[in-house]
Image (cartoon, rainbow, N blue to C red):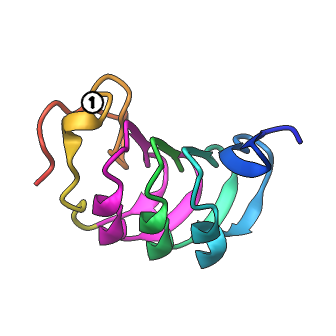
Amino acid sequence: WKGVDCVDSVVTGLNLSNNGLSGQLMSDISKLNAIKILDLSDNDIKGVIPSEIGELQNLTHLRLSFNSFRETVPSELDNLHHLELLHLHGNRLWGEMPNLDTSSLLTRSSFISDCGIPTEFYIALN
């Protein structure tokens, strides 16, 4: 399927960016426990980012930018120890960021800002 990467019938990547998707990201996302890349950017996904996303222990790339996510970023994101890229900008998020381990984040490609032009960060967010 277009946008779905598998290894031995196990989903390891999901790139559904700019597909006109709408609705909510459900807690069942945690069932994709081997996924490394999750890109749902540039869609019309609403609601909150489910806390279960923190159960995706193999996740290296998370792009949820340019949707209609609201409220706070779940603190469970700090469980994603292999995360190298994080894009959350272009949503309706507020509050404090979880205490992320930024040592593995690609500093030139990780955008967290929500207003105006996305900014790069070079230091820990705590």
| Residue 79 within the magenta-colored segment of the rendering | yes
Residue 6 position by quadrant = top right
Q: Name the residue rendered at 63%, 61% in the picture.
A: 32
Say what amino acid the circle numbered 1 marks: Glu
Q: In the current view of this chain or complex, which residue is farthest to the top?
A: 108
Q: Residues within 10 Å of mark 1 (few under 14, many from 20)?
A: some
Q: Which residue sits at x=80%, y=45%?
A: 19
Quarter of the figure with the N terminus: top right
Question: In this image, 116 relative to 124: left or right?
Answer: right
The image position of residue 23, as x and y in percent, is 73, 70
Height in image: 68 above or below 74? Answer: above
Residue 71 or 55: which is nearer the viewer?
A: 55
**Chain part drawn in magenta:** 65-94
Q: Is residue 25 visible?
A: no
* Extreme-right residue of the structure: 1
Seen from the viewer's position, the closer of residues 107 and 81 is 81
Q: Is residue 65 left or right of residue 41?
A: left
Residue 5: x %, y % from top left: 74, 39
Q: Position of residue 15 (x, y in %)?
A: 69, 41
Residue at (45, 61) in percent of width and height: 92
Q: Is residue 50 visible?
A: yes
Residue highlighted by disc 1: 120
In the rendered view, does 50 fall on the left or right side of 83? right
| Quadrant in the picture for residue 74 | bottom left
